[in-house]
């Protein structure tokens, strides 16, 4: 084959590729986003004649995989952590041991909260038995918090533990406030039902308690401003 013939053949082949690419482009739909294990890449997928095509290197980047070109094939290699099927930002659920300990701690804190409410209703008539009773409930709730802390093994457990500690701290503050009210011999604050209804700290404690109970039963971590 002479030089002119070779040039003609190459030119013809190039033109055929250009015509084929043009025909495929005309049949292609707008590029679509590709979502793999929660990771999204815009414009990574093109559909042509009912078939979807994605660039191998783009796919490897999404999967954080190694790509290797070999004669007759392309090899993608991913790690086990990238093939778990979960988005990387998802925090694991609460462990069963922690959820069980947390529910038990909530029960202790509800008992403590009830004792504080009873102390406020009793007021001055409660006498000297109020302080030791409230202290006993606080100690039991604190011991339960320690057991819950030991049971915290996952990231979700530790995040939820901070909310439980927040509830404990708020209860501790409300306990101190209640005893100060009783010691002040302020009968109106002791006996007026509106005092409890307008108590913002009590409302926060009640909201957090309900939230924590639902979260622990559900087994998935969530956050609430009422527990901070």
Image (cartoon, rainbow, N blue to C red):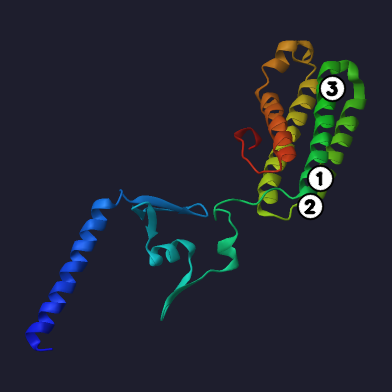
Where residue 208 sits, quadrant-wise, is: top right
- Residue 12 visible in the shown view: yes
Residue furthest bottom as drawn = 2
Residue drawn at x 75%, y 35% is 172
Residue furthest front as drawn = 1
Q: Which image quarter is the C terminus in?
A: top right
Element assignment for label 3: helix
Q: Nearer the viewer, residue 201 or 88?
A: 88
Element assignment for label 2: helix
Q: Which image quarter is the N terminus in?
A: bottom left
Task: Indicate the position of residue 103 as horizontal and vertical percent values.
Answer: 79, 39
Work out whether 48 lies above or below 107: below
Verify CB contact (< 8 Å) between mark 2 and mark 1: yes
**Tag 1 or tag 2, which sits nearer the N-term?**
1
Q: Which mark is residue 70?
A: none
Q: Which residue is mark 1?
A: 101
- Residue 68 visible in the shown view: no
Q: Which residue is mark 3?
A: 119
Work out whether 55 lies above or below 149: below
């Amino acid at each position: 084959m002479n030089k002119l013939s070779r040039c003609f053949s190459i030119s013809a082949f190039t033109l055929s590729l250009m015509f084929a690419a043009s025909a495929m482009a005309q049949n292609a739909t707008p590029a679509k986003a590709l979502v793999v294990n929660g990771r999204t890449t815009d414009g990574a997928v093109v559909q042509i004649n009912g078939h979807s095509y994605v660039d191998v290197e783009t796919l490897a980047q999404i999967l954080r995989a190694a790509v290797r070109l070999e004669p007759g094939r392309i090899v993608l290699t991913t790690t086990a952590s990238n093939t778990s099927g979960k988005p990387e930002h998802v925090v694991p659920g609460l462990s069963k041991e922690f959820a069980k300990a947390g529910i038990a701690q909530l029960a202790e804190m509800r008992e403590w909260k009830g004792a504080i409410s009873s102390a406020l209703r009793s007021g001055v008539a409660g006498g000297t038995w109020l302080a030791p009773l409230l202290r006993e409930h606080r100690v039991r709730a604190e011991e339960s918090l320690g057991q819950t802390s030991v049971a915290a093994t996952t990231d979700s457990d530790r995040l939820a533990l901070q909310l439980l500690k927040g509830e404990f701290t708020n209860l501790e503050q409300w306990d101190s406030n209640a005893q100060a009210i009783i010691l002040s011999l302020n009968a109106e604050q002791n006996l007026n039902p509106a005092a409890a209804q307008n108590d913002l700290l009590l409302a926060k404690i009640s909201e957090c308690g309900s939230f924590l109970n639902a979260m622990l039963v559900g087994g998935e971590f969530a956050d609430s401003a009422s527990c901070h």
